[in-house]
């Protein structure tokens, strides 16, 4: 479940939609939590779906630590990628704001920790990285954990 002080909004033609903060979301705020309405699909289940459903799962889901696909029921599935994301995922089935997120600003994730199956090139931004890769979690977990350690004491 996405934070209640957000809304789905059209960003632009290239990005499509994104999740926007409607109020200040302070660093250390839990911005998303896996809940009972989110759906989990095994890779076998997804392979056996009709093509249109597989495409939807490919676009709007992420893979958990078991390799299953998680499809969020609410607009959290529209959170976009950024190498300079303002939210990070935890091992506790939640995401946390790693800095203040201001009204009108997009909530963003680094898709590198979402167990992507193949590399892709996102929109260019000010980052040494230019590809999201399947092994990003192995290569950047220490950096991401460091950012989370700073804000964990702020979680209410």
Image (cartoon, grey):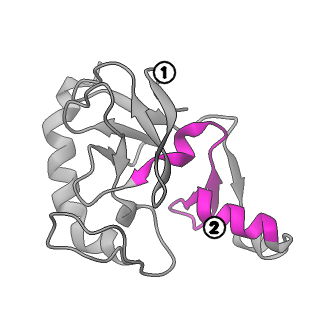
Please state the horizontal and vertical placement of residue 26, each as a whole percent of the image. Answer: 24, 24
The numbered dot on residue 4 is 1
Which residue sits at x=38%, y=40%?
Answer: 95
Task: Give the quarter of the image for residue 150.
Answer: top left
Number of marks: 2
Residue corresponding to mark 2: 58
Please state the horizontal and vertical placement of residue 134, each as a whole percent of the image. Answer: 41, 77
In the image, the segment drawn in magenta is: 52-80
Query: Which residue is nearer to you in this view: 99 or 68?
Result: 99
Farthest residue to the bottom: give it.
118
Determine whether 13 is above or below 73 in the image: below
The CA distance from mark 2 to mark 1 is 26 Å
Residue 148 lies left or right of residue 64; in this view the side is left
The numbered dot on residue 66 is none
Q: Which numbered disc, 2 or 1, marks the residue that appears first in the sequence?
A: 1
Farthest residue to the front: give it.
13
Q: Residues within 10 Å of mark 2 (few under 14, many from 20)?
A: some
Which residue sits at x=84%, y=70%?
Answer: 49
Dividing the image into 4 quarters, which one contains the C terminus? top left
Which residue sits at x=39%, y=22%?
Answer: 22
Dividing the image into 4 quarters, which one contains the N terminus? top right
Give the structural element (helix, strand or loop) at label 1. loop
Which residue sits at x=21%, y=43%?
Answer: 148
Please state the horizontal and vertical placement of residue 20, each as a whole percent of the image. Answer: 41, 34
Question: Magenta stretch: residue 142 in it?
Answer: no
């Amino acid at each position: 479940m996405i934070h209640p002080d957000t809304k789905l909004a059209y960003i632009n033609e290239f990005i499509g939609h994104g999740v926007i903060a409607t109020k200040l979301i302070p660093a250390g705020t839990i911005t998303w939590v896996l809940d009972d309405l989110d759906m989990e699909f095994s890779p076998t289940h997804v392979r056996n779906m009709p093509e249109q459903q597989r495409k939807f799962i490919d676009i709007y889901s992420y893979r958990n630590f078991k390799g299953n696909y998680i499809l969020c029921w609410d607009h959290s599935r529209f959170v976009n990628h950024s190498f300079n994301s303002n939210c990070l995922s935890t091992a506790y089935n939640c995401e946390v704001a790693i800095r203040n997120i201001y009204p009108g600003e997009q909530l963003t994730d680094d898709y590198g920790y979402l167990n992507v199956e193949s590399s892709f090139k996102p929109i260019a931004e000010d980052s040494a990285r230019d590809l999201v890769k399947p092994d990003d979690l192995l290569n950047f977990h220490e950096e991401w954990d460091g950012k989370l350690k700073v804000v964990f004491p702020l979680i209410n």
